[in-house]
Image (tube, helix red, strand yellow):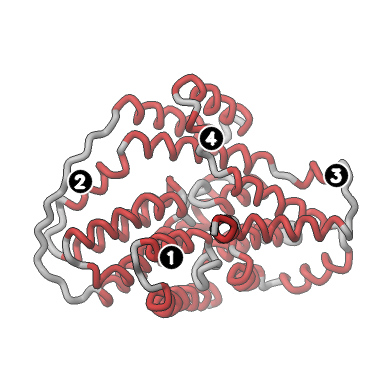
Amino acid sequence: MKKHSFFKEHIVLLVSLFFALLSLFFVPPSREYFSYIDTNTLLLLFSLMVVVKTFEDSGAFLAISNKLLEKSRSTRALFLWMIFLCFFSSMILTNDVALIAFVPFTLLLLKQAHLETYAIPLLIFETIAANVGSAFTPIGNPQNIYLYYFYGFSLEEFFQTTGPLTLVTALLLLAGSFFVFRHSSPLALSITKSNIKKETLLWALLLFILCLLSIFKLFNTYQSFLGVTILTLFVKPKRLISVDFSLLLTFVCFFIFSGNLQNLPAFQEMIQNLLKGRELLVTALLSQGISNVPAAILLSKFTMAKNALLLGSNIGGLGTPVASLASLITIRYFSKGGGEIKSFLLPFFRWNFAFLAFLLIFYSI
């Protein structure tokens, strides 16, 4: 049972490891392997995961949620708060963390308010919101961090690319929410007050500023990494252990796999011909099968169309459950809460592919 659970939780790592090992047969190991690995991405990811853990320990997430929910006077207002809480928080916390923080909270809240029948549509819209909201910032999701450093985006250039996508998806979420939750009823919630650990929150903000300094390119990622690590060792070393090392190792495996493919002339020519003028579409479609993070890493080695690749990898997070691994987090929590996955998947596919199709058409016009 434990082996089965490990496989389910680390499926992407195991797949990436398989492909990395497979590529060794075509390109024997050498010192060049070290040049494949984007250390900027790994160091910033590590630092951000420590920052998020510190924010979690401060109790800030729960306090913000409760404050917003106090303002809810109807079921529709409640659902809109939760959806857009995921949308905006994912821009800073990443889509994965936003869902880890708010999906269990949503399930608990719906149970307390006797609104369990709304769980499936609300969780689906929260998942879409986290996946598209995270597209806006360089730190919103792992592929954005990677592409930001790989292509040397400036912040202005990055936001000019992702800003219109964020605005369009926000409007889509609003329209879809009003359609799905069109039957609204009065709501009276008793919210349990939660206290924020102010000292921990201040530490979290300090660590986050160190990460932002590397995003603004005032520090390099090594300096931010050292600052975050040393300060955390001083305050609470256990937070360093809480980092998702399997995600970091997954990145290393995909770096090796994509780097080796780049050294195969026949494959390189095939991918370049496939991508030419179709970077956004190919990236989005490839993400449906292998997820948007590995799709971005792989295809970045074969094209300089950075804006199309950035948009394609973020739009490609919609669609199948594996298109964005954050979606699997929602499914896992829904299942743990006693929900039937089969009943969840059909509306999940319907709404995700509706958003995906609209955005692909929008960017093809």
Instruction: Tell which tag, 2 or 4, sits nearer the viewer.
Output: 4
Nearer to me, 91 or 12: 12
Q: In the image, is residue 213 above or below residue 346?
A: above
Q: Which mark is residue 331?
A: 1
Q: Spatial distance from mark 3 to mark 2, Cα to Cα?
A: 52 Å
| Cα distance between the residues tagged 1 and 3 | 39 Å
Q: Name which residue type carries label 1.
A: Ile
The residue under label 4 is 241
Residue lying at the far front in this picture: please name it.
1
Earlier in the chain: of badge 1 and badge 3, it is 3
Q: Nearer the viewer, residue 178 or 166?
A: 178
Q: Residues within 10 Å of mark 3 (few under 14, many from 20)?
A: few
Residue where numbered disc 2 is placed = 67
Q: Secondary structure at mark 3?
A: loop
Q: Is residue 123 left or right of residue 207?
A: left
Q: Secondary structure at mark 2?
A: helix
For the point 70% across and 62% down, the residue is 299
> Which numbered disc, 3 or 4, marks the residue that appears first in the sequence?
3
| Residue 287 place in picture, x, y as percent | 60, 67
Q: What kind of residue is marked 3?
A: Glu
Q: Quadrant of residue 38?
A: top right
The mark that comes first in sequence, 2 or 4, is 2
Identity of the residue drawn at 38% across and 61% down: 336
